[in-house]
Amino acid sequence: MVKLSVVVPFYNVQTYAPDTLRSLRANAREDFEFLLVDDCSTDGTPELLERAEREIPGARVLRHARNEGLATARNTGLDAARGAYLAFLDGDDWLSPGFYGRLVATMDELDCDFLRTDYVRVTGRGRSVRQVPVGRRGEVLRPRDAILPADRTTSVDYPYAWAGLYHRRLLDRGLLHFPHGLRTAEDRPWIWRLHREAESFAVSGELGIFYRRGVATSLTQIGDVRQLDFIRAFDQVIDETKNDPDAEQLLPKAVRTYCAVISHHIGNMAKFEPEVGRQLRAMSSGALRRLPQDVLAEALTAMGEDRAGPLRRLKRRRPAPAPAAPAPRPAALETNAA
């Protein structure tokens, strides 16, 4: 029986993948499997994964015939996973030895739907701890209760899929897959869905995930059109929250978060290519117009004029249509799985 399946997408990370793979080896157990998803890398990453499949117990390589993005790569791993628990890791991050074993022991003890963990943020030689914004540790809680209040940072603002462990019953309920084709912000609809629909979660004080910040190939560092997928991601958050029985209470939080993210991107306009910047303004204008206007007005008032003013002006621009979802995923998977 496989106790834990770890899904690890890789795309052109040959510089960092050796650290990731060494850390997986230091976490290997006979009842763990590591699903290494090569998202059609064009550098030396495929060769590194081939060697890892031979040398790391439980490693299996899954390959995309074309690059499909992080969300779809994670879904490929989920579709192949056999574990009672599931976890995610990005191909340029790493773990402390035995970290997953300690998390599994905590999940066995608490028997909750999902477990969230703190992480270490690594920027060059600097390191700092980032904590789950939930004060109660080691205690089973109700995820829906951790969404609010609207005016504070809460558990849905900590979307990192790799910062936790997830029970297979969530996969069986259809709650762990990511929106196909999203190239950024793929974890925002995902974390909101978990908190609305899962029944229990807990926070562990165990520290052992090292998140590499400032990687040149990361989408957070690249100002191209892929960044604009945050619009589709947050549109999904809003649409699904509108249909929730507690929509009146939850929508202010979702709208405030959406506005804050739009404000962040508009404030960093200089990093975008000129045409992408124009698209960003037009698409953000359309997004603001699609939001419930009474809830939006309250959110902008709460933001303060320095951030709300540019968003009000943006809303008055001629908007772009809502971004279209990608076509259904075609069969584009190659696998070395036995």
Image (tube, helix red, strand yellow):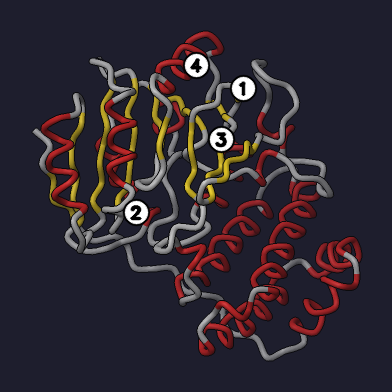
- Circle 3 packing at 10 Å, graded few (<14), some (14-19), many (20+), is many
Give the labeled residue for mark 2: 72
Give the labeled residue for mark 4: 107
Q: Residue 18 carries which label?
A: none
Of mark 3 and mark 4, the one earlier in the sequence is 4
Is 314 placed above or below 44 here? below
Is 57 placed above or below 243 here? above
Give the labeled residue for mark 3: 119
- Is residue 41 something one can see in this rendering? yes
Q: Find the distance from the CA under tag 1 to the CA under tag 2.
A: 30 Å
Q: What element does badge 2 sit on?
A: helix
Find residue 90 and report its horizontal and vertical position in percent. 39, 45
Q: Find the distance from the CA under tag 4 to the CA under tag 2.
A: 26 Å
Q: Label 4 amino acid?
A: Met
Of mark 4 and mark 1, the one earlier in the sequence is 4
Q: Find the distance from the CA under tag 4 to the CA under tag 1.
A: 13 Å
Q: What element does badge 3 sit on?
A: strand
Of mark 4 and mark 2, the one earlier in the sequence is 2
Of mark 3 and mark 2, the one earlier in the sequence is 2
Q: Residue at x 90, y 66 (%)?
A: 304
- Residue mark closest to the camera, 1 vs 2: 1
